[in-house]
């Protein structure tokens, strides 16, 4: 009941729109302008309210930033503008298109090895998953963890602090309180290291998580720090309402009801100012609970009736809380017929929302108390058993204490004293575990008292022998108390040790199950990879066979043709297909189905062309190819260029069957580029021949293939013809890395 807190948003931070527009007006066409366009787009996106015109403006600036970044080859700007576009689609309601756009941005940034920006894209991906159910919350946590791993490579930044604060919040929603505390403490450290003053949000959240973890002294420390910082930076929005509200809850738990009431009133004033109905309802619920605790049920009832009349409960959480409070207040007032109405309402709600029953003990607390106080013990047992299963499943410490106490009271009421004693012993063991330090202090005081009394007894024995028996009895009584106290401490210690053993055993069992699941998934991935490799090889084999069939068909067709030009065209087509067929043959014969060993491929292709064209000519082939592996998308155009150049050299460069030499070169040059040249010492190109303005299919084909490689195509006519193309080798990972 004391964790009913609203979700409030803070105003935008950073430069205002006018400042950004002034900077844009004087910006040059460079990367800083692209970054500025993205910042303006984010300003419109984060502007309070969700107005279509703001979304249109954000989308316009993201488009402008993307176009400028592409023109400047500014990869960071391209990725960030795509992220902004995805956020706009998400905020506009088109979540599917937004997700697809953000996925493209993430893939682009990872491919370009931009770690920090990739981390931002992971954060944007996390925003697509609501925290309302376990599966989506786990995805949200996973994406945020990946983002932090990448963002922290740049060191302490404000973005890292934001991400850590979000992750800490997700952990507490997932009930991983220890993790949440560790992450939030680190977020606070990063905020301070970068000189960020507005830390009221993270300190407020830290205080709340410490409260949930039962560490209310630390909860009070961070709650007061959040109030101090918020007031210093003049944060008067709904975030301050949340801070006051959570601090009031902490004071309530620490039994400081006066200060709890003061901060509830402060929180309510801000909620009324902003007309935040949800916040008003939650604060009023807790105020009614406080008045009930102060034994003022009439005022609590009036507060609750006023709230329900002004803002009738609508969602399930409000309905459950309202029924719970009314039932308990009427029981405080001993008005059991009215209480029964709300107990029955809780039972009806549990049937209407069965998925909530397994997570919420509120459904059962009021019925347990009602049936106990009206002496309907059989029904009380029914709800006690059901509540026990919920408490055990969700590890609810405070709820377990309440349940064990009602078990003991109910057993005692029906005369089952043995069971009552066992439940009360469990209740005392758990509740007293937090008081062990106080108990040790009491034992020390008893020891001191014993020493003083022992000395007094010695003096009295010298003066009055008659008091010896009385002093001996008192001494035995003290020993007996110390012995009983020691036994109690021993039982508590043994219980804690056994509890830790059970927790460790349960954790090991969960870890073993997860490891088995991971192993089975890895085995499935390995099999899928093998199947994929086999299928890819089979495809390349079939493509090669199909190309061979086409070559055979062309060969058959040429038998029916007499036109020399047609025969020559068919023969050229056969050679081009053979160049491509040889690539697919290499792929299915190799263990690596993604790359071609160019040194082997070029030698085999040159041998094939030499055997096909030499026709008695004495031509020497000189091959100088560095060992390099290229992607199929680059090997195919290179093979076709090689085919055209060598074919032309063999056919036209050496007239009258004179001797000649053809050199084939593939070597690396600067900056990851490669140079491929085919040179002959033949007659060269005719005088006046323009290779860049010709109807020759071969020349056009070589130029087009060079453009496909994003390369530079050059012809040199000096003591023969030299055909060269310079291109950049594509970067790629091997298949194992891709799968991993």
Image (tube, rainbow, N blue to C red):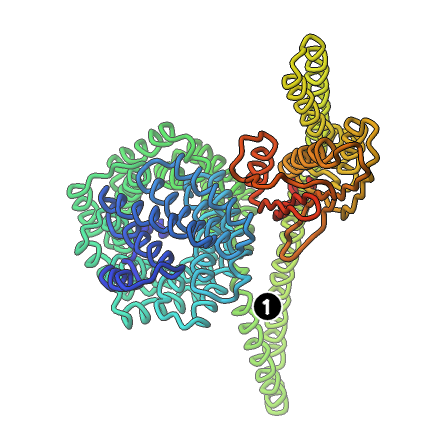
- Where in the figure is residue 701, as x and y percent of width and height? 58, 33
> Can I make out residue 523 in this image?
no
In the rendered structure, the answer to whether residue 707 lies left or right of residue 736 reads left
Picture layout, residue 419 above or below residue 11: above
Residue that appears at 31% across and 52% down: 41
Residue 433 in which image quadrant: bottom right
Label 1 CA crowd tier, 10 Å (few <14, some 14–19, many 20+):
few
Residue that appears at 21% across and 58% down: 270
| The C terminus, quarter of image | top right
- Residue position marked by numbered label 1 in the rendering: 481
- Where in the figure is residue 537, as x and y percent of width and height? 72, 27
Residue 37 in which image quadrant: bottom left
Residue that appears at 38% across and 58% down: 35
- Where in the figure is residue 507, as x and y percent of width and height? 64, 47
| Figure label count | 1
Q: Secondary structure at mark 1?
A: helix
Give whichever of 158, 529 is nearer the camera: 529
> Can I make out residue 618 in this image?
yes
Give whichever of 39, 291 is nearer the camera: 39
Picture layout, residue 658 above or below residue 241: above
Give whichever of 481, 30 is nearer the camera: 30
- Where in the figure is residue 79, as x and y percent of width and height? 45, 49
Residue that appears at 38% across and 70% down: 196
- Toward the top, the furthest residue is 560
Residue 192 in which image quadrant: bottom left
Give whichever of 689, 646 is nearer the camera: 689
In the rendered structure, the answer to whether residue 450 lies left or right of residue 132 reads right
């Amino acid at each position: 009941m004391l964790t009913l807190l609203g979700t409030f948003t803070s105003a935008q931070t950073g430069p205002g729109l006018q400042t950004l527009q002034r900077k844009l007006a004087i910006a040059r066409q460079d990367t800083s302008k692209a970054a500025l366009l993205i910042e303006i787009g984010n300003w419109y996106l984060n502007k309070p309210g969700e107005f279509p015109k703001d979304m249109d403006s954000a989308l316009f600036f993201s488009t402008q930033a993307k176009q400028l970044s592409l023109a400047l080859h500014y990869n960071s700007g391209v990725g960030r503008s795509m992220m902004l576009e995805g956020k706009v689609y998400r905020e506009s309601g088109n979540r599917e298109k937004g997700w697809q756009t953000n996925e493209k941005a993430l893939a682009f940034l990872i491919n370009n090895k931009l770690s920090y920006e990739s981390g931002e894209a992971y954060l944007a991906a996390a925003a697509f998953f609501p925290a309302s159910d376990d599966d989506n919350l786990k995805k949200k946590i996973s994406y945020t963890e990946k983002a932090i791993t990448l963002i922290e490579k740049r060191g302490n930044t404000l973005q890292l602090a934001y991400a850590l604060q979000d992750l800490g919040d997700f952990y507490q929603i997932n009930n991983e309180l220890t993790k949440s505390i560790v992450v939030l403490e680190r977020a606070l450290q990063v905020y301070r290291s970068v000189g960020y003053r507005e830390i009221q949000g993270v300190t407020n959240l830290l205080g709340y998580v410490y409260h949930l973890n039962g560490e209310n002294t630390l909860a009070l420390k961070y709650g007061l720090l959040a109030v101090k910082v918020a007031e210093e930076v003049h944060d008067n929005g709904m975030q301050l309402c949340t801070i006051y509200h959570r601090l009031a809850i902490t004071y309530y738990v620490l039994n400081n009801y006066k200060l709890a009431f003061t901060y509830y009133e402060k929180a309510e004033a801000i909620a009324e100012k902003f007309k935040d109905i949800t916040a008003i309802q939650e604060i009023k619920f807790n105020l009614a609970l406080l008045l009930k605790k102060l034994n003022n049920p009439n005022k609590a009832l009036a507060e609750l009736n006023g709230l329900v009349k002004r803002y009738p409960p609508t969602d399930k959480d409000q309905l459950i809380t309202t029924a719970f409070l009314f039932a308990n207040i009427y029981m405080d007032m001993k008005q059991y017929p009215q209480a029964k109405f709300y107990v029955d309402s809780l039972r009806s709600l549990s049937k209407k929302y069965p998925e909530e029953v397994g997570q919420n003990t509120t459904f059962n607390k009021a019925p347990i108390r009602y049936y106990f106080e009206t002496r309907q013990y059989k029904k009380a047992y029914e709800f006690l058993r059901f509540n026990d299963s919920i408490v055990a499943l969700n590890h609810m410490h405070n709820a377990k204490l309440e349940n064990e106490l009602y078990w003991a009271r109910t057993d005692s009421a029906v005369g089952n004293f043995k069971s009552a004693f066992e439940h009360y012993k469990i209740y005392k063991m758990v509740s007293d575990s937090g008081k062990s330090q106080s108990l040790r202090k009491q034992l020390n005081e008893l020891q001191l008292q014993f020493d003083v009394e022992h000395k007094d007894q010695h003096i009295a024995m010298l003066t009055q022998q008659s008091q010896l028996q009385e002093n001996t009895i008192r001494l035995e009584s003290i020993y007996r108390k110390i012995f009983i106290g020691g036994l109690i401490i021993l039982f508590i210690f043994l219980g804690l040790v056994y509890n830790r053993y059970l927790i460790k055993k349960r954790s090991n069992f969960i870890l073993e199950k997860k490891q088995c699941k991971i192993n089975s998934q890895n085995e499935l991935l390995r099999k899928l990879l093998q199947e994929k490799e086999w299928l890819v090889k089979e495809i390349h084999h079939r493509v090669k066979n199909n190309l061979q069939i086409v070559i055979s068909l062309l060969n058959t067709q040429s038998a029916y043709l007499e036109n020399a030009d047609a025969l020559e065209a068919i023969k050229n087509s056969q050679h081009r297909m053979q160049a491509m067929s040889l690539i697919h043959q290499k792929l299915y014969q190799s263990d690596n189905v993604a790359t071609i060993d160019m040194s082997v491929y070029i030698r085999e292709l040159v041998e094939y062309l030499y055997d096909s064209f030499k026709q008695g000519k004495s031509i020497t082939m000189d091959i100088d190819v560095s060992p390099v592996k290229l992607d199929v998308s680059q090997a195919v155009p290179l093979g076709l260029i090689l085919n055209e150049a060598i074919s032309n050299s063999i056919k036209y460069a050496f007239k009258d069957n004179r001797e000649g030499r053809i050199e084939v070169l593939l070597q690396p040059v600067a900056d990851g580029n490669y140079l491929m040249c085919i040179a002959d010492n033949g007659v060269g190109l005719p005088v006046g021949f323009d290779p860049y303005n010709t109807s020759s299919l071969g020349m056009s084909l070589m130029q087009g293939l060079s453009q496909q490689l994003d390369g530079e195509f050059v012809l040199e006519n000096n003591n023969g013809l030299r055909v060269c193309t310079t291109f950049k080798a594509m970067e790629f990972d091997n298949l194992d890395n891709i799968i991993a």
